[in-house]
């Protein structure tokens, strides 16, 4: 892999990068419409393709939080046309690494020792990038280890990066910039948490303990004594990424097994721990040689507050949606229907959101659900397309918690779809209070 | 007032330590060499056998740090396998690491010099040491083909690195970020930019092309030169 030679540093430089992208996108539009003058059949697909590669190119040079945003956007496949998604998906695997001496410097700062003094072996060339850090292979006492080293100055640049990404998110998602702020802040909070590696080690240990009872899911051992605010040491997990796994043409039974492990992992967390690994992009999982699911990154955890959990899962799970007044009540609690909405608006949003939630909760409606069926995803994409064209949905609605919960569940669905898995959806049911049902 | 149990000073190193201690405790240099020598239980003449002035101590502090860092980075197992770029990065990271242990005194000596843009007088002793080291690293890079050998210019690479050095030292002195993370970023980016310029680049090709065209007779005729 090519070592990245420079990383745009100051805000000015980063802005310049984004401005350039802006120009390029503008240029793409001009190119598109002038071509369209002569060839009216030209689809938007080509334009989207052009835009996606330009945005991706500048984001991948920015590294850090901007890359994270690229990853985030790529998770929300429903909000983005397919061409964007393909390009952004690349960012989940590759980002250029930093220099060897800086790695050494990070170690001496944390431990007063160089990596080769701390470990028996340490490979100064990183094996892959982890969006805000990079992973190195090391060994100690015959054990193979994965050492994650964070880029310096990441936490510092997150806020300024997000400010720069905002106008783009605004354009890509068609949202109002002011309204977007609440959501951006939520994202900023999670991203800043992700830069705290000490927190990540603590959480990783907690979560892997709590999830130990799950069959077919394994976690690496973490070594707090070899970790610091900028470094995480854990067991090296052997295994294949999802794409490699699928390339081996696994049997349906095996696909279902991995799919079920994923489903159980997520639903156990949401409903038993009320906190969830909110970063279900394929780069965070491995399929081990003995065909188990390995979870290798607990950087992003979303805690689900009670005042969100209750109304949301009561809707999804307990047939609450058969009662109109109770449903509207829940929508109000979730900010999907707002206090100064007119009667007509209440009716409109009630219908629209009911449609959305019925769609998203389809997997729960039967005992097993086949995620390979394209119809389910087509319906979701169509619904996404439809609402982006509706002026009523120009302004985002719903409390901020939706971002990560939707991202988590939709990310899970997407992976299950790629696996073509059929899973039992009735394991680890939501724990909503029963009295809510009497409404 | 002389301390009761001062052991006889024998090395320049110990004089330096005493001087640093004095300056940091009193936030000013001793009133005179005479006064300082007396505190050390030595005569002024004895002091001059080690240093000619207080500024000489400060200069020797900086050259001392520089020599030590160069020695330390070269001790690293990985050193021979580093590229020129990585060697220079390693030097700078090692430099700020060592300087951090003496940050107060280093800043004190730097702040005495108001002109921050030119290199401070106190670093004058460092310059030959650093340039010597830089030249060594650059020559390694030129030999391995990592860096572009350009007539006239390759001799100036070390000057560019010296500018980098004084810039980074000043940057570090003003850095108030946690664990001096900003300095790390400044090093990573600054050194990389310098080495990007030292490498073969499109400009070299353009220059070669220009030379080729200039030598080409027909082209010259057509251009009416």
Image (tube, rainbow, N blue to C red):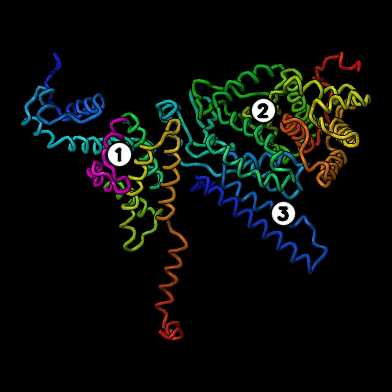
Which residue is denoted by mark 2 in the rendering?
A294
Q: Which residue is mark 3?
A: A49
Q: Are marks 3 and 1 in contact (CB under 8 Å)?
A: no
Using residue A341 as the reference point, say whether residue A66 is left or right of it. left
**Where residue A335 sits: x, y (%)?**
79, 30
**Is A36 in front, or is A257?**
A36
Vertical order, B79 against A200 (above or below)? below
What is the span of residues highlighted in magenta in the rendered image? B104-131
Tell me the SS state at disc 1. Answer: helix
Check chain identity for marks 2 and 3: say if they share one: yes
* Residue A178: x %, y % from top left: 69, 40
Protein chain holding label 3: A
Neighbours of disc 2 within 10 Å: few (<14), some (14-19), many (20+)? many
Label 2 SS: strand
Res B17 → quadrant? top left
| Quarter residue A317 falls in | top right
B177 sits left or right of B97 in the view? right
Which chain's residue wears label 2? A
Q: Dot 3 lies on which element?
A: helix
For image coordinates 40% across by 73% down, the residue present is B211
> Is the residue A282 above or below the residue A24 in the image?
above
Q: Quadrant of the C terminus of chain A?
A: top right
Q: Is residue A165 magenta?
A: no
**Decide: marks 2, 3 in contact (CB < 8 A)?**
no
Residue B41 location, x and y as percent? 10, 22
Distance Cα–Cα, label 3 vs label 1: 51 Å
Write down the residue under mark 1: B70
Task: Tell me the residue at 62%/34% (across/down).
Answer: A188
Please tell me which residue lies in front, A150 or A168: A168
> Distance of mark 2 from mark 3, alpha carbons?
33 Å
Q: Chain of mark 1?
A: B
Q: Nearer the viewer, residue B202 or A34?
A: A34
């Amino acid at each position: 892999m090519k070592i990245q030679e420079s990383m745009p540093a100051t805000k000015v430089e980063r802005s310049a990068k984004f401005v350039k992208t802006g120009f390029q996108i503008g240029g793409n539009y001009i190119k598109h419409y002038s071509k369209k003058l002569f060839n009216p059949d030209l689809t938007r697909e080509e334009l989207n393709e052009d835009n996606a590669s330009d945005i991706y190119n500048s984001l991948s040079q920015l590294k850090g939080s901007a890359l994270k945003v690229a990853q985030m956007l790529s998770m929300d496949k429903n909000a983005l046309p397919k061409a964007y998604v393909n390009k952004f998906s690349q960012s989940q695997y590759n980002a250029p690494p930093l220099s060897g001496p800086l790695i050494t410097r990070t170690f001496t700062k944390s431990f007063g020792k160089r990596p080769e003094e701390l470990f028996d072996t340490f490979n100064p060339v990183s094996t892959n990038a982890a969006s805000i850090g990079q992973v190195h292979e090391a060994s100690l006492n015959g054990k193979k280890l994965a050492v994650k080293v964070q880029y310096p100055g990441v936490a510092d640049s997150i806020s300024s990066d997000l400010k720069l990404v905002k106008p783009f998110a605004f354009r890509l998602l068609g949202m109002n910039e002011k309204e977007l702020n609440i959501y951006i802040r939520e994202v900023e909070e999670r991203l800043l948490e992700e830069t705290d590696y000490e927190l990540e080690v603590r959480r990783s240990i907690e979560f892997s303990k709590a999830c130990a009872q799950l069959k077919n899911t394994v976690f690496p051992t973490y070594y707090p004594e070899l970790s610091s605010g900028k470094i995480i040491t854990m067991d090296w997990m052997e295994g294949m990424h999802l794409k490699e796994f699928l390339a081996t043409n696994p049997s349906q039974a095996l696909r279902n097994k991995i799919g079920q492990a994923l489903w159980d992992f997520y639903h156990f967390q949401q409903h038993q721990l009320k906190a969830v690994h909110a970063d279900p992009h394929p780069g965070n999982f491995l399929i081990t040689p003995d065909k188990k699911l390995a979870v290798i990154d607990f950087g992003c955890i979303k805690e689900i507050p009670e005042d969100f959990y209750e109304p949301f899962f009561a809707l999804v799970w307990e047939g609450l949606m058969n009662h109109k007044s109770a449903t509207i009540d829940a929508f109000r609690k979730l900010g999907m229907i707002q206090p100064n909405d007119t009667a007509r608006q209440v009716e409109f949003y009630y219908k629209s959101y009911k449609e959305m939630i019925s769609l998203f909760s389809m997997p729960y409606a039967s005992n097993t659900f086949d995620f390979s069926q394209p119809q389910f995803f087509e319906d979701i994409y169509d619904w996404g397309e439809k609402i982006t064209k509706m002026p009523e949905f120009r302004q985002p609605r719903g409390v901020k918690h939706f971002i990560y919960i939707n991202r988590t569940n939709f990310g899970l669905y997407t992976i299950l779809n790629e696996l073509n898995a059929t899973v039992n959806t009735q394991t680890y049911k939501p724990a909503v209070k029963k009295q809510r049902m009497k409404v | 007032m002389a301390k009761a149990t001062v052991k006889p000073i024998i090395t320049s190193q110990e004089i330096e330590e005493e001087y640093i201690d004095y300056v940091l405790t009193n936030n000013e240099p001793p009133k005179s060499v005479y006064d300082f020598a007396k505190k050390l239980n030595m005569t002024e003449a004895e002091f001059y056998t080690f240093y000619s002035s207080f500024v000489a101590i400060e200069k020797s502090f900086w050259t001392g740090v520089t020599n030590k860092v160069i020695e330390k980075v070269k001790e690293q197992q990985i050193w021979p396998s580093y590229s020129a770029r990585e060697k220079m990065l390693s030097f700078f990271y090692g430099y700020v690491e060592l300087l951090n242990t003496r940050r107060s005194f280093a800043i004190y000596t730097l702040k005495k010099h108001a002109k921050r843009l030119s290199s401070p007088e106190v670093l004058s002793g460092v310059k030959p040491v650093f340039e010597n080291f830089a030249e060594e690293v650059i020559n390694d890079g030129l030999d391995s083909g990592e860096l572009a050998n350009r007539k006239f210019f390759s001799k100036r690479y070390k000057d560019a690195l010296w500018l980098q050095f004084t810039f980074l030292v000043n940057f570090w002195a003003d850095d108030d970020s946690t664990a001096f993370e900003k300095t790390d970023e400044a090093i990573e980016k600054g050194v990389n930019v310098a080495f990007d310029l030292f490498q073969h680049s499109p400009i070299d090709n353009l220059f070669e092309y220009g030379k080729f065209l200039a030598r080409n007779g027909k082209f010259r005729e057509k251009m009416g030169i």
